[in-house]
Amino acid sequence: MESTGRYIYEFEYGEEDKTFFDKDYCLIHLDQYLAPGGYSWVFPKEKGKVNIGLGVQKRALENRNKRYDKKDNLIGLIGQYVKMNPVIKNPILSTDENDMGNLEGTWQVPVRRHNDCLVANGYAIVGDAAWMPRPIDAGGIGPAIYGSVILGKVIATAIKNKDYSEKSLWKYNVEYMNTYGYNMASFEILRKYLQTLTNDEISYGMKNFLSQEDIDDITRRQHPKFNKVKIFNPIMLIKILTHTKLASGLKYTSSKSSKLIKHNLNYTDNPEDFEKWQKELLNEINEADIRFNLKN
C-alpha cells in the first residue's frame, strides 16, 4: 500500500522550468528523499491550475526519516514538494466550483499485482478491492474498466445458466489475465527494484540504460526490456563496468519480467490446478524478493 495525497491549486507563474511544470505534459518525479518508495507528480489541469501531490511507502518513509533524522509525514512532504517548485507561486486551493468537493485528499492505494484468483462460489472482486491498480504507477481506472467489462460478460452468462459456482466464474480469471493482467506481477517486481535504488542510481540508469524502445514500452504500459545493458560495445561496456550492480539489477529485473509474463499467460483454465500455478508464481516472486534483500 502507498499513502498518497494531492491538492488542486490555482497559482501564479514563477520561473519557466519544464522539468517542474509543463502545460502539455504530466510530470512524474522519482525522488527517494521527497517521495520515498513512491513518486511525486505535477499534472496540469488548465492555465494556472495544477493537480500536485505524491505517494510514499510506509517502510521507505520510516527508513528515510531515520536516515536523515527527520519526522516528516505525507502532508509535510507534499508541502515541501509544492514549495520547491519554481514555477508554482502563491498556490491556493482552486476556487472553481467544478472542483468543489475534490480539492484535496489523502488515500491508501494498492500497488501490488492483482489477486491471483478473483472468484469463488457466488463471489467475484474487481477494481481496488482486487488490488487492480498497476503496481508501477498506481493507475487503477484502466485495469478496473477491463476487469469490470470482462466480469460483466461472465456474470451475464452465469445468470443465464443459473450457475454461480467458482468453475462457472473462472473464465473471468483467465480472460482478465490474458487481456490485461499478465503484466502486473512483472510491474510489481520492477516497482520493488526501483524502490531499492538511490536517486543517483535512478538518474544514471535513465540516462544511460533506458532506450527509446524502453520509453515506448513504458508509454504503452508494457514492461521495459533494458536491452542496453545486454549490448557490449566499448562505450556501453564502460558504463556497465562502472555501475555493475545497477546494470546487473536491471538485467535481472528484465529476465524475471519475461518469466512472470510467460507464466501469467499460462494461467490455468482449471480451478483444480490453481494451487500448483500459484505456487510457481510465488516461488518466482520470492526469489526476486531475496535478490532485492526484501526478506527479513
Image (tube, helix red, strand yellow):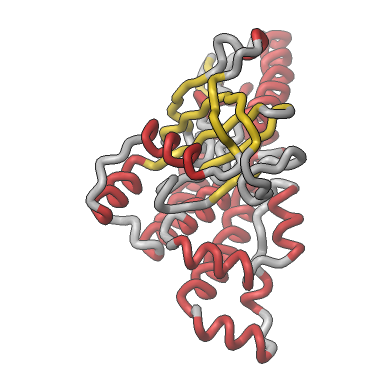
Image: 281 above or below 112:
below
Q: Residue at the location (40% across, 65% down)?
A: 291
25, above or below 198, in the image: above
Total numbered circles = 0
Q: What quarter of the picture does the C terminus occupy? A: bottom left
Foreground: 204 or 280?
204
Instruction: Identify the residue shown where x is 66% and y is 64%.
Output: 225
Can residue 182 be seen in this snapshot? no
Q: Residue at x 46, y 38 (%)?
A: 55
Residue 173 placement, left or right of 115: right
Which residue shows up at 31% across the image and 56% down it? 295
Residue 255: % across, % down? 58, 66
In which quadrant of the rendered view does residue 294 lie?
Answer: bottom left
Q: Position of residue 72 (x, y in %)?
A: 31, 40
Residue 150 is drawn in which quadrant? Answer: top right
Q: Is residue 189 above or below residue 207?
A: above
Quarter of the figure with residue 169: top right
Give the residue at the far bottom of this rendering.
234
Residue 271 shown left or right of residue 181 in the figure: left
State the residue in front, 238 or 130. 238
Classify the position of the N terminus by image quarter: top left
Residue 277 appears in view = yes
Residue 250, image x, y percentages? 55, 67
Q: Nearer the viewer, residue 226 or 236?
A: 236
